[in-house]
Amino acid sequence: MEYSVKSGSPEKQRSGCVVIGVFRNRRLSTAAKAVDQASDGYITAVLRRGDFSGDKGETLLLLEVPNVLCDRVLLVGCGKERDFDEQAFQKVVAAAVQALDRSGATDASSYLTELAVRHHGADWKVRQHIVVAESTLYRFDQLKSKKDEPRRPLKRMVLNLGSRRELPAGERAVREGMAIASGMRLTRDLANLPGNICKPEYLAEQARLLARTYDPLDVEILDEKQMEELGMGALLAVARGSTNPPRLIVMRYSGGSSDEAPQVLVGKGITFDTGGISLKPGEAMDEMKFDMSGAASVFGVIRACCELQLPMNVIGVIAAAENMPDGNASRPGDIVTTMSGQTVEILNTDAEGRLVLCDALTYVERFEPATVIDIATLTGACIIALGHVASGLLANHAPLANDLIHAGRTSFDRVWELPLWDDYQEQLDSNFADMANIGGRPAGTITAACFLSRFAKKYRWAHLDIAGTAWKSGKEKGATGRPVPLLMQYLLDRLEERQRSGK
């Protein structure tokens, strides 16, 4: 969909639909007041009749409103004005877009971006509006023989700002919002694909396709032989039981100077996870196609960087493999040597994500990175700890953790930091190798990060456990596109930080 920003009165908009907010207790937003005044109290009369209460997410489509130039007016309930926060804004925008999609309007002017959200300016509201709208309209129907086409799809949306002074920041926010939404769409598309299509080599081909599309992007694909030469015994051990060979995918986005240290993102790319010999229960195993969501999010961020032409260097590394149980698969008790030279006793083959990531974390030392962030659907324990609201965060560098927490708050793609204390490391002790790949049931998310930390000592590193946030189950089953908004906000913050410092 096309987006633009504008500053103008709602009653004067020649549009298929004007979207205005109404709070509980008949409290009209600024735009609603303007439409109400122009229409001689039409909105107030609707509220007095009890046709609309203003509950959060409630919508009412009005036709032929007197003295306004638009075809329709959509009222959107915003709840209590004093409680209108980031979550309410997202819910209101999603409800509005759903109603517009049903209405038949092909274009709309939204005045929801004029609503006050504490601590956030117009640029934030524009960007969030676009990201939420695109997420709401997203459909994954590529593999359906019959697709549900909207009667008249929404094609254009104007986001209105209260002042012309806000337009330059609003236009920048449109570009950022559309790039982030595009990255999230790619992330969701890849994660939603079934394991019989999205194999390690398929991900490699998608990386090549991105490189053919965007000039600043170079791609290198490492195959089994090259990984063997590098000594990636842990990654290769995970892939041994599958007929689909692993791939290490390196995507280099060069938007900055040649001497600039890159921001490195490492994604877990287990394209399907049966658990290996430590076989998972059959129930909901289909959702293990989402076990490459970390890798998918790296793809999404790289695409967003390319579309924004971000003036910085970003490297995405994907450790792609399939975890299957056959006669050649790794067994519990096997000991493997990682690329770092450290040995690992595999006590559970279903703790495979950390095995592919540890070799990738060693590999990225060669880039002399500014920071390294790995993203992985790593532990069910993270879902128990944080549910499906926040991603888990652990880091070996407090300022990096703080930067990610701040980016999460700004993007409303939030994280919660867990401790990475040395006290937990002893749970990984092994009688037969340098470490075990699991540390028992207590503090499972933390001990998984402790394992990874042993391979990330030469740079500033953070780990994002997205097991609870990467996808939804049940009726709304599907990938969410997180944490692309968080990671893009983190990168945008680094650019702003650089500009403030004059570097």
Image (cartoon, rainbow, N blue to C red):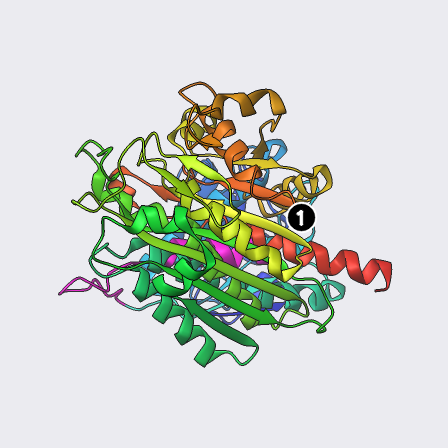
Magenta stretch holds residue 146: yes
For the C terminus, which image quadrant? bottom right
Q: Quadrant of residue 165?
A: bottom right
Q: Position of residue 296 (x, y in %)?
A: 41, 56
For the N terminus, which image quadrant? bottom left
Viewer-closest of 114 and 16: 114
- Determine whether, in the image, residue 9 is placed left or right of residue 53: right
Please report the residue visible at 72 percent of the width from the left and 73 percent of the height from the top: 257
Viewer-closest of 90 and 470: 470
Q: Mark 1 is on which residue type?
A: Tyr
Asked if residue 67 can be seen in this view, the reply is no
Q: Position of residue 237 (x, y in %)?
A: 33, 47
Asked if residue 243 can be seen in this view, the reply is yes
Q: Position of residue 279 (x, y in %)?
A: 21, 34
Relative to 152, residue 492 above or below? above
Viewer-closest of 414 and 154: 414
Which residue is label 1 attached to? 459
Relative to 286, residue 251 above or below? below
